[in-house]
Image (cartoon, coloured by chain):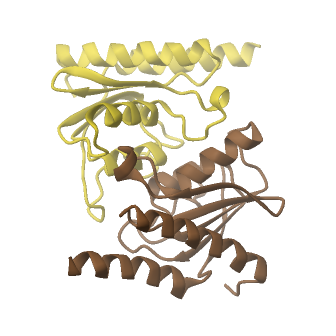
Chain colours: A brown, B yellow
Amino acid sequence: MIANNTNIKFMKEALKEAQKAASKNEVPIGAVVVFKGKIIGRGHNQSINTNDPCAHAEIMALRQAAKKLFNYRLTDVDLYVTIEPCAMCAGAMVWARIRNLYYGTRDPKAGASGSVFNIVNNKKLNHRIFVHRGILEKECRKSIQDFFKKKRKK
Amino acid sequence: MIANNTNIKFMKEALKEAQKAASKNEVPIGAVVVFKGKIIGRGHNQSINTNDPCAHAEIMALRQAAKKLFNYRLTDVDLYVTIEPCAMCAGAMVWARIRNLYYGTRDPKAGASGSVFNIVNNKKLNHRIFVHRGILEKECRKSIQDFFKKKRKK
């Protein structure tokens, strides 16, 4: 999609989160949750450091946002994430009933917004999410590629 | 499958967890995580009361177990849950790399172990789980049906 300034601003914040993950030697994925033009949840991948298989960027950001709104349902809420969400995170977004999902680059190995599964937009489930792909795609792809390049060198 | 005494014992514990959810007016789903014959994680659905879209029985139980083993990877670990897991929970089980999933009754509306998706046993993902369906099936089905019957009466 053609990203506007708002999209770019929030994806840059998601990229900052991804950077935090990289600095902890976690796969660099970052997410922010936006409500009425403001960030109400931030998250970065930290499964290894927290011993938590569920500690993906999107889950962290969604949980923080729900706590802030005192509601597990995040109506009229948008989520930005640097990489296409996995099945777990896509499933969480459907339960939370978020409105828009903006993501940077595809994940052909585990993506659940069209790549391996399509969970965010499935007629059988009771909620569907508008998906906008390709926000700062190059930057998001580079962020994860750089991380794995460094890892391989080591 | 034909359940043995061990399977029945642990599914009864999962049903106790489901009962805890019902008593809080949450959809009664319960789960336990088992390692070397011992329960190392318990969970019941509590999304509404905790304002957390991710607070499903399985997620709660997996997170507790991972904290206990100091590892987000739950190798040689089994999970018992009263109802077929959703996409979020099935996805979490794959990340956690659990060995066996035992569940009570199917969820035709959102189940991700064959009903709507098959996430726990998908060749494209990097881990597959052995699935055993129908442990205390009648009891598990009744537990959820009773809850919704009561709700409709009110």
The structure residue drawn at horizontal position 62% and vertical position 16%, both measured from the top left corner, is B24
The structure residue drawn at horizontal position 65% and vertical position 18%, both measured from the top left corner, is B25
Q: Position of residue B88 (x, y in %)?
A: 48, 47
Name the side, left or right, on which B106 lies relative to B69. right
**Nearest the eye: B149 or B59:** B59
The relative height of residue B152 versus residue A68 in the rendered view (above or below) is above
Name the side, left or right, on which A84 lies relative to A47. right
The relative height of residue A13 versus residue A94 in the rendered view (above or below) is below
**Nearest the eye: B138 or A36:** A36
Name the side, left or right, on which B82 lies relative to A41. left
Q: Position of residue B79 (x, y in %)?
A: 30, 32
**Nearest the eye: B7 or A88:** A88
Q: Position of residue A55 (x, y in %)?
A: 45, 49
Residue A117 in sight from this viewpoint? no
Residue B31 picture quarter: top left
Residue B49 picture quarter: top right
